[in-house]
Image (cartoon, rainbow, N blue to C red):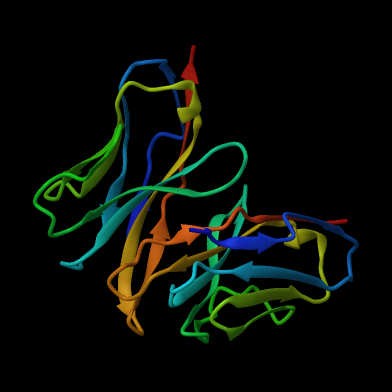
Amino acid sequence: AQKITQTQPGMFVQEKEAVTLDCTYDTSDQSYGLFWYKQPSSGEMIFLIYQGSYDEQNATEGRYSLNFQKARKSANLVISASQLGDSAMYFCAMRGRPKDSNYQLIWGAGTKLIIKP
Amino acid sequence: DAGVIQSPRHEVTEMGQEVTLRCKPISGHDYLFWYRQTMMRGLELLIYFNNNVPIDDSGMPEDRFSAKMPNASFSTLKIQPSEPRDSAVYFCASSLGQYQETQYFGPGTRLLVL
């Protein structure tokens, strides 16, 4: 069965420090995609970053990078130089098995990140 | 470019009433998803459409829930009759297509059924 595990229900980090949010996944597929979304207290779900299973380089988007370790089946999100506005829930998601030419997302439980001033 | 648009943003209704949630996907996106988020169950996929056709509605909780997509730019999720346990945030998301599977979410509708 395909599964996403986020083992950190909550984290406190000092402002300006780097943050690593853990995500491990389980799949038998060779082709898959991994996503991170941010959900601030206002409620919207914001797409942050994507990593394809065949991408040789770790994905980066501004201060966000994805530490992709395929053999360990981990896809940790790294936020550099954290800011107060980074306080939010963060969800890891994986593209599931193809069905009818689409790929449903399988979601982790989320990690609540709080940045301390 | 406009993102996914949802209305209303907040809805308070009484048990037994009909509730209709609306969604306008990003123009050109072929896939539309309806999710429900609660503290207890997290984010659940209810149903998704491809080119206006429902593909998988296995996540729809029961017959009280129905969804339609009459055209490429509009979808509705209807709950009739509503119950207090339907209280949740309902998200609509859209994605470009088969190989562009990043889903972009609307702001959500916060539903409270009294």
- Please state the total of marks drawn on the protein image: 0
Q: Residue furthest top?
A: A117
**Residue A1 shows in this picture:** no
The residue lying at 51 percent from left, 64 percent from top is B93
Note whether A69 is above or below B51 in the view shown.
above
Q: Is residue A85 left or right of residue A20?
A: right
The residue lying at 62 percent from left, 76 percent from top is B75
Q: In which quadrant of the rendered view does residue A82 lie?
A: top left
Note whether A48 is above or below B1 in the view shown.
above
Q: In which quadrant of the rendered view does residue B87 lie?
A: bottom right
The residue lying at 39 percent from left, 63 percent from top is A105
**Residue A19 shows in this picture:** yes
Q: Residue furthest front?
A: B1
The residue lying at 18 percent from left, 67 percent from top is A31
- Name the spot of residue A78 as percent of width and height, x first: 28, 33
Q: In this view, does B84 lie to the left or right of B41?
A: right
Q: Nearer the viewer, residue B61 or B107?
A: B107
Q: In this view, does B22 lie to the left or right of B2?
A: right
Note whether A60 is above or below B103 in the view shown.
above
Q: Is residue B69 left or right of residue A96?
A: right
- Name the spot of residue A59 as percent of width and height, x first: 21, 45
Note whether A15 is above or below A31 in the view shown.
above
- Name the spot of residue B7 as percent of width and height, x first: 71, 62
- Name the spot of residue A77 as percent of width and height, x first: 30, 38
Quadrant of the image containing the N terminus of chain A: bottom left
Q: Which of A77 and A3 is in front in this view?
A: A77
